[in-house]
Amino acid sequence: MIAVRELPAPPVCRREVLRYMGARENAEMEALLDRAIALCEGKLRYRVCYREVAVACTGDARYPEGLALTSATLGRALAGCDRAVLFAATVGLELDRLILTYSRTSPALALCLQAYGAERVEALCDAFCEEFSDATPRVSPGYGDFPIEAQGELFRLLDCPRKIGLSLNESLLMTPTKSVTAVFGRKENYEHS
């Protein structure tokens, strides 16, 4: 069964946004970040769709049931786990619209919005994973030898377009762009916290 959750906005880590921008902390950057945060106020939706599945084993390979692609990276993430959680997270399309608008008139602000969006979706993923007290670190397609093609499998298993309005194009890029798909294992407790 696929579940859908809308989470409250996690606290903003301003230092992380500046790191994504490649910028130093100074008054000008702080003012730019304040403007980006103000523009996004009330416009982001922190949505996650997920499903919990059994971990299957073939020889030494461990992988979430239903996911046809395997990898050593994913196998290490699921070591010692009987269950895996497949999930997709997004902060919504409005941020993409803001980035496009300001890319024409204020490239610095567009860059800041990009960085803010990256921090927001990562904070969303962290907040979601923290709800599972026994979660292993998450692994996303494209990390290590976990093939980017797994995006398509995760989209199929999670019904992302219908559940949270997340789509995948032929180049395996997601829309909205500030979105993540990932897998993590569960070691002990199988009840959602």
Image (cartoon, rainbow, N blue to C red):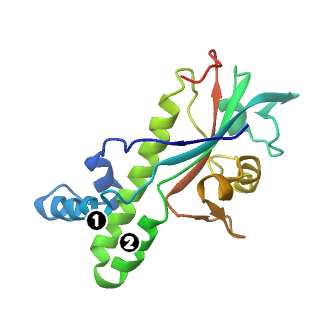
Query: Image point 40% across, 57% down: which residue?
Result: 44
From the viewer's side, name the closer residue of 123 and 19: 123
In percent of width and height, residue 159 lies at: 71, 52
Q: Residues within 10 Å of mark 2 (few under 14, many from 20)?
A: some
- The extreme top residue here reads 188
State whether residue 68 is above or below residue 185.
Answer: below
In percent of width and height, residue 78 lies at: 69, 29
Which residue is tagged 1? Answer: 39
Query: Image point 68% across, 38% down: which residue?
Result: 73
- Amino acid type of the residue that numbered disc 1 sits on in the rendered structure: Leu
- The extreme right residue here reads 59
The quadrant in which residue 20 appears is bottom left
Q: Are marks 1 and 2 in contact (CB under 8 Å)?
A: yes
Query: Image point 34% across, 69% down: which residue?
Result: 111
Direction from residue 48 to residue 54 in the image, left or right? right
Which residue is tagged 2? Answer: 98
Direction from residue 188 to residue 59 in the image, left or right? right
Direction from residue 130 to residue 136 in the image, left or right? right
Give the CA distance from mark 1 to mark 2: 8 Å
- Amino acid type of the residue that numbered disc 2 sits on in the rendered structure: Leu
